[in-house]
Image (tube, rainbow, N blue to C red):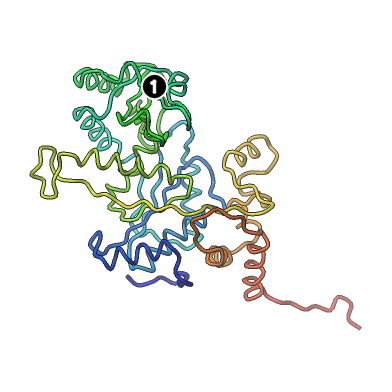
């Protein structure tokens, strides 16, 4: 694939590129590299997202691969079309090119539902009547195992009937969930029978009122990656202990499946590789979508493009250039451990870029 104008060259080799390079040489995934940037459309992007964009897009370019922009729109209560439009503008402004690969997770709701029914049929998922408060109480702690739900051993037929009635809208919000049947004593809390679907009677910004059950992030995003053929699912470090669940869901679907489709459940689905990296932390800088929303709704700032914010819209309005932000992303690199970057590094990148392009004008205000 030809590298488009403005794409940053690789400076050195980070651990992700080394990992992918080894997999490509070994012929894994047929030697293909396919990445994605999957924001949730519930706020504007900030400088931390720029790092994620350029890790994913930069790696796809370095290896001659593909890059998707995918909206993880599985929570209709928090998502709006305004955020979708703003994110598209910001990612394009940064210089990333997804071609015709603009995707929405909600487009896969039907396929994900069918896979969920499959896990119910396999005895790997069940409908639970515990309230959110009871679920939290039964989950246990890091030092105390969880307690099994009294609904864990429902018959497959009953689970299937209840799950279909959940989809049909027969039950109120929060009354039932679909949970994976894994291990309530696992030291990894994410594997303690996590919720796969919850009931939420809220219109979706793309699907309208078609759905009243919505997939949870851990169930949805690995399957979205699989459907799109993503090979390397690159995400921030807080999802490292979610990786076993990412793998478990795909392995559970593939149980009873074969490469040639001759198995009782058909052909195996694609299994991407999740890799985690440290997120961006900067001195003297707030990078929280929740706080940005509070500031805007409270009238403390004049919109998400207020120059006092480090949203990409705010930085753009402040006069920052995409070239400066790309250079910043190159300088800070990719690491496996968390660290804090001095905001002066970003300011230096902006200063250097503007020094190259800002016009110089001289004027005599009071000529003789």
Please state the horizontal and vertical placement of residue 39, each as a whole percent of the image: 45, 47
Q: Quadrant of residue 184?
A: top left
Q: Position of residue 140 (x, y in %)?
A: 45, 26
Can residue 232 be seen in the rendering of this structure? yes
Question: Which residue corresponds to mark 1?
Answer: 147
User: x, y percentage for residue 87?
Assistant: 48, 50
Tell which of 97 and 183 is nearer to you.
Answer: 183
Above or below, comparing residue 150 to residue 272 in the picture: above
- Residue furthest out toward the right: 368
In the rendered image, which quarter is residue 116 located in?
Answer: top left
Q: In this view of the protein, can residue 105 be seen by the observer?
A: no
Q: Is residue 177 left or right of residue 302?
A: left
Quadrant where the C terminus is found in the figure: bottom right
Judge from the rendering whether residue 75 lies leftward or rightward of residue 65; answer left or right. right
Name the element at disc 1.
Answer: loop
Image-quadrant location for residue 251:
top left
Q: Residue furthest bottom?
A: 368
Instruction: Judge by depth and name the residue closer to the eye, 303 or 30.
Output: 30
Tell me the crowding category of disc 1: few under 14, some 14 to 19, or many 20 or more residues within 10 angstroms, Cα based: some
Residue at the (41%, 35%) spot, across then down = 187
Residue 109 lies, with reference to residue 351, above or below; the image says: above
């Amino acid at each position: 694939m030809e590298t488009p104008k403005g794409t940053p060259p690789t400076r050195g080799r980070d651990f992700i590129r080394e990992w992918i390079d080894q997999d490509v040489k070994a012929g894994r995934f047929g030697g293909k590299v396919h990445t994605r940037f999957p924001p949730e459309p519930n706020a504007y992007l900030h400088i931390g997202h720029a790092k994620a964009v350029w890790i994913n897009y930069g790696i796809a370019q370095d290896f001659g691969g593909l890059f998707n922009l995918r909206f993880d729109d599985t929570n209709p209560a928090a998502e709006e079309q305004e955020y979708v439009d703003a994110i598209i503008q910001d990612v394009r402004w940064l210089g990333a090119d997804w071609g015709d690969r603009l995707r929405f997770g909600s487009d896969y709701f039907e396929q994900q539902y069918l896979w969920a029914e499959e896990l119910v049929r396999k005895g790997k998922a069940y409908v639970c009547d515990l309230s959110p408060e009871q679920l939290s109480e039964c989950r246990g702690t890091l030092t105390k195992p969880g307690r099994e739900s009294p609904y864990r051993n429902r018959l497959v037929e009953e689970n299937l009937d209840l799950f279909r009635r959940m989809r049909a809208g027969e039950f109120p919000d929060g009354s039932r969930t679909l949970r994976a049947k894994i291990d309530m004593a696992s030291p990894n809390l994410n594997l303690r029978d996590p919720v796969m679907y919850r009931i939420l009677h809220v219109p979706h910004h793309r699907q309208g009122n078609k759905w009243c059950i919505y997939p949870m992030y851990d169930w949805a995003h690995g399957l979205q990656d699989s459907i799109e053929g993503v090979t390397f699912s690159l995400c921030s470090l807080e999802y490292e202990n979610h990786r076993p669940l990412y793998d478990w869901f795909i392995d559970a679907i593939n149980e009873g499946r074969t490469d040639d489709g001759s198995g009782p459940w058909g052909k195996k689905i694609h299994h991407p590789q999740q890799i985690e990296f440290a997120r961006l932390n900067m001195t003297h800088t707030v990078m929280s979508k929740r706080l940005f929303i509070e500031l805007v709704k409270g009238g403390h700032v004049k919109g998400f493009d207020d120059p006092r914010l480090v949203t990409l819209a705010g930085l753009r309005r402040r006069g920052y250039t995409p070239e400066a932000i790309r250079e910043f992303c190159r300088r800070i690199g990719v690491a496996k451990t968390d660290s804090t970057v001095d905001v002066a590094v970003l300011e230096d990148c902006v200063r250097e870029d503007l020094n190259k392009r800002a016009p110089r004008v001289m004027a005599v205000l009071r000529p003789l």
